[in-house]
Image: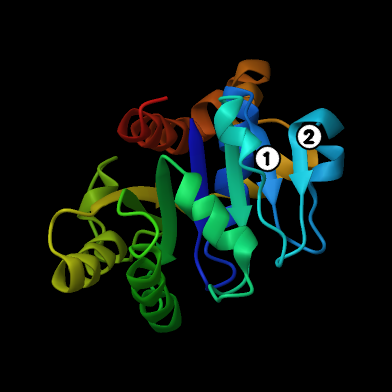
Amino acid sequence: MKIAVYSSKGSAGKTPISTNIALDKTFCIGTNEAFHIFDSLIDDNQLIALDTEEPFPSELIDLDIDIVFDLAGSISKLAVSITSALTMADVVLVPIYNEYKSLVAGLNTIQQIREYNTNIIVIATKLQKGKKEVFSSDWTLSDDFINIQKAVQHKFGPQIQVLPLKFSKVFDNIFEEQKSIRQMMQNSGLAKYNYREVAEQFDDIYQAIGI
């Protein structure tokens, strides 16, 4: 399984999503980030770090390697690291949060990705409950999620699935503790309680991907 996580807009949640998947599922990581943080998180034999102008090797397909591509930068003729990863990925996850620049960049990103891969899932990130919002654990009822879903479906129709991922400090803890959310939950009863919603949302993402 090869999963690309990409948006041209920074701070949407690409790296936390990629890292949690890799740690949870023991996947390799591929990145084109010039200054990445994976050296302390991922074994050298499970990490591929390239420049933007370098393609990811086609041997990844021949060897049937499970990998998550954490991609940065903009799609262009020179950014072959991005286009090579998008082409070989089984699915592309596009994180978008409910902010104007992120929405615009996310929709433009999807449009560009569709030239290389049409199996796209949007992850609605940084979801927060407003003061007047009343719902339990169904984050698809949040105003943030609804606004992102409406924007995606207005432009591309219902064929692109949108899944929720709430805002949580646990995403910082992934890097501080060098563990996935589920791994942290196994070691602490408090973490098991506090992180259960986010962990269940990742379970929904895994189910949609098929891993």
Q: Nearer the viewer, mark 1 or mark 2?
A: 1
Viewed as shown, does residue 29 lie left or right of 42? left
Can residue 66 be seen by looking at this rendering? no
Disc 1 to disc 2, C-alpha distance: 8 Å
Vertical placement of residue 163 versus 196, above or below: below
Vertical placement of residue 131 versus 20, above or below: below
Task: Tell me, yes or no, whether the two marked residues, 1 and 2, touch with CB atoms within 8 Å.
Answer: yes
Residue at which label 1 appears: 29
What amino acid type should be assigned to the residue bearing mark 1?
Ile
Q: Secondary structure at mark 2?
A: loop
Q: Secondary structure at mark 1?
A: strand
Q: What is the quadrant of residue 79 in the picture?
A: bottom right
Q: What is the quadrant of residue 59 in the picture?
A: top right
Vertical placement of residue 184 versus 144, above or below: above
Query: Mark 1: few, some, or many residues within 10 Å (few <14, many ≥20)?
Result: many
Can residue 177 be seen by looking at this rendering? yes
What is the x, y in percent for residue 144? Answer: 31, 65
Nearer the N terminus, badge 1 or badge 2?
1
What is the x, y in percent for residue 33? Answer: 74, 61
Between residues 75 and 72, which one lies in front from this camera angle? 75
Q: Residue at x 28, y 66 (%)?
A: 148
What amino acid type should be assigned to the residue bearing mark 2?
Ile
Q: What is the quadrant of residue 101 in the picture?
A: bottom left
Between residues 119 and 18, which one lies in front from this camera angle? 119
Between residues 41 and 77, which one lies in front from this camera angle? 77
The numbered mark at residue 42 is 2
Viewed as shown, does residue 21 lie left or right of 179? left
Q: Residue at x 19, y 73 (%)?
A: 155
Query: Mark 2: few, some, or many residues within 10 Å (few <14, many ≥20)?
Result: some
What is the x, y in percent for residue 6? Answer: 51, 59
